[in-house]
Amino acid sequence: MKNIFFKSFFSPWVISVLIITLLISMPILVIFSGIWNEAGDFWVHIRTELVPQYIRNTLILAVGVSIISLIFGVNLAWLISNFDFPGRNFFDWALIMPIAIPAYISGFAWAGILDYTSPLYTFLRNNFGWNTGQFLFFDILSISGAIVIFSFALYPYIFLIAKAYFDRQSGNLFEASASLGRSKMYTYFNLALPMARPAIAAGLSLVLMEILNDYGLVKYFGVDTFTTGIFSAWFAFGDKSAAMKLAVYLMVFVLFLLIFEKMQRRRLRYSGVSEGKLMSRIKVSGFKGWLITFFSIIPFIVGFAFPFLQLVYWSFDTWEQFLTQGFIRLLTNSFLLAAISALIVMISSVLIIYTLRLYHSRRLKLVSVISTLGYALPGAVVALGLLVILSWTENFFIQHWGLRIVITGTWFGLIYAYLVRFMAVGYQSVESGSEKISRSIDQAALSLGAGKFRNLWFNSLPLLRASIISGFLLVMIDVLKELPLTLLLRPFNFDTLAIRAFEYASDERVAEAAPAAVMIILAGLMPVLIINRLIGRTKI
Amino acid sequence: MIVLEAFNLKKKYAGEYEFAVNDFNANILKGEIVALLGESGCGKTTILRMIAGFEKPDDGILKLNSQKIASKDFMTAPEKRGVGIVFQDYALFPHKTVNENILFGLFRLSKDKAKERLIEMIALTGLNGLEQRYPHELSGGQQQRVALARALAPDPSILLLDEPFSNLDAMRKNELRFELRDIIRKAGTTAIFVTHDTRDVLAIADRVFVLKKGVTIQQGSPEEVYRKPADSYVASFFGKTNIIAVDPNSSVLEDCFGLCIPKNQHLENLASIRPRAFKIAQENTEGAFEAKVLEQLYFGEFLELICETENQKLQLIVHADPDFVVSSRKIWLRVHPEDVTYVKH
């Protein structure tokens, strides 16, 4: 193994993999240099006054969202996987749909629904005489409101992974439990859940990463966390080193998450997943069946139907206005940026995975995994790391060659950042496709005298086509939805759909934000079908 | 005492044309070890699953200890039946130790009683020293014993075993067969096991049901079924055999082998003769016939000869001693009348 690695070190394939990995890991490493930055007066203020509050808010959000999203995500996954109840087939994919609405969009939609002037409140006030004051029920613009919005926007991560696991769990285990006299309830809590723990932990850590990543929702709801702190340090106070120190704090949270997930994953070794017979679904009709239906409909309504319908309703008023305000430019900006980024991510992914196939080296594999770490990092952190690198490069050019180049605030900087942040999405879809292709196909082609590039072009690419296309789409949609990173790195006066939606909503022009939000959601619904087909394995 | 009764049990899966199980009838006595034998798709596993309560019969009645447990419109839940089952993949709970697996079904007993029973089961299945291990730390044979201990612990009325030997190392299979039989006997339980391997049946079953396409073709003791197969299918299932067409009018047995055995009174029109039944004889001995050796295959335990009889040009499989040397292409063979069995088509 060692020999092969060193012998092949100078092959163009391996070198390009190393270069990609280095490019991606640089901004991540740079953040840690923030620890040694000189601390200004402002930092002392932040550390003593704000950081404790950031930590408290982050923990409250994490605990609250974990509880609600676990209750809905895990139980619904179990119910959908094992029982046949009224509407089951609809909920099988409808329960994933909230994933298409970014939390900040769902947030301002719900704020609108519960607002004094909302159609719902107006209707209830005029027809039923309900008058609860400025808000219907409760002030959603609070940390508890943020918990609810996050939970119903993010539970699909847990639902998807848990369901994929439950779908493959061996039916024999549950039949054995039944024949030993145990009830279904007991079996669920004492067998199914403990065995599914690694899968559930994987879903939960995705949810928590999304919370750490979020800027839009916490900003809109007035909940101060590390991301809002980074933004105000950077924009309001222009204190780069304070922003970087906050980013380091955020990284510590991320690290804890990664370790937690890794510890759980080690248990997967004996997971109770069978190759053979799967459970057949049990029919539940009557009252019990409808009870499950009712339970399933809550997250669908809260996470998707209500906010989506509210946005569509607003869009009817503002659609024409939206079309005239530089609509074409906005659309080309967003989609072109997303498409170029996705293309670069996919080319890099294919290059890495194909090289791994060719050289089959464990060290190379370890190195290449580093390139996927960006997904765990909040967008604001990636953006900060990149800003530092880009300004270093600009300074370097001026000092050594007297060349004045501009790369901060350009498309180049943005695309570079998306590559860092979303490399894992492309990497994983190509990797899962590649695992299904036997290595002997490469070996056959090479032994027939085809060069490595010829083999890639005529064999691997056509065989990987489906995974490349789905990876491309997933990256594209992630870029379309991305907010904090884009806000920090965008060129001057440059808007994407996500920025337009967020900025209008922040300016209390929610109705004008709606059309852009609807477009993001519609684009986001596309991969819902793909994801369902990729992860889910249907059973009879 | 009858433990389990099945009357005309029928089962058809949705979307299938043929019955998976068609009119299965059985009375299983206390302490019996019964085998359901057949190729895959013969319905043997479906019968097991209906007894366990994982499938509902379309018709017929199942009674356990004279209590109805399943019929067309009645079904006792599996957790209420008191039926133990050992799955083909053992289905041990991967996150629980050997002890925890065995204790799983003992929740109706008091803590002390459960502990007592656990120790009893560990001793019975010889799992001493492995109590704190997790399933993935055990060998295949050990895993099977844990599954057995777990199923036997709540003292089920009947123990079901799905292909108990298919996952085991071929080298140790024989040993493990007798080990399993001893454990079942010592526990004093009634057992039904499903298999496609006649060697399992011959080694440990008291009674066997041979199934084909959901129908019971023959039942009886393994010896009976081996010696007097009901039809050519059963005869071939239990090892190689020579099936010879004997129409009521033909005299092939007499012409070929010089056998004068009574014409069969029933309408069976085939005869089955096992390869071992043919003995090598001296030239021109009384009752011997001449055959030409076409091919010889060495199997270690025996020598297989493909022969052709001189007079009727009938091809035969003959198993001779492994040290027999075929010195000339012509040999003489003899067969005893009692080794010839009439079978149905």
Image (cartoon, rainbow, N blue to C red):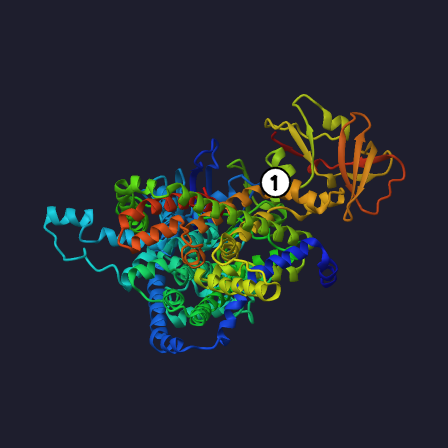
Q: In which quarter of the image is residue A92?
A: top left
Give the percent coordinates (x, y) of residue B338: 69, 37
* Residue with the most extreme left position: A129
Residue A68 in view of the camera: no
Q: How many marks?
A: 1
Q: Is residue A472 above or below residue A73?
A: above
Residue at the farthest front position: A402
Which chain does the numbered disc 1 sit on?
A
Disc 1: which residue: A462
Foreground of the two, A228 or B341: A228
The residue at 18%/57% (across/down) is A135
The C terminus of chain B: image quadrant: top right
Q: What x and y, as percent, mark residue A155?
A: 37, 55
**Residue at horizontal 16%, vertical 48%?**
A122
**Looking at the picture, how far across and down is residue A125, in whole percent?**
12, 50
Question: In the rendered view, does A511 fall on the left or right side of A18?
Answer: left
Residue at the (61%, 37%) spot, across then down: B234
Task: Estimate the x, y position of residue B74 in percent, counting from the top left.
Answer: 34, 43
Seen as rendered, the residue at the extreme right is: B327
> B70 or B248, which is in the foreground?
B70
**Can residue A255 be seen here?**
yes
Q: Is residue A68 left or right of residue B312?
A: left
The answer to whether residue B329 is above or below residue B173 is above
Amino acid at pointer 1: Pro
Secondary structure category for the residue under label 1: helix
Question: In the displayed structure, would residue B64 be above or below residue B304?
Answer: below
Q: Residues within 10 Å of mark 1 (few under 14, many from 20)?
A: few
**Of residues A79 and B172, the one drawn nearer to the viewer in this rendering:** A79
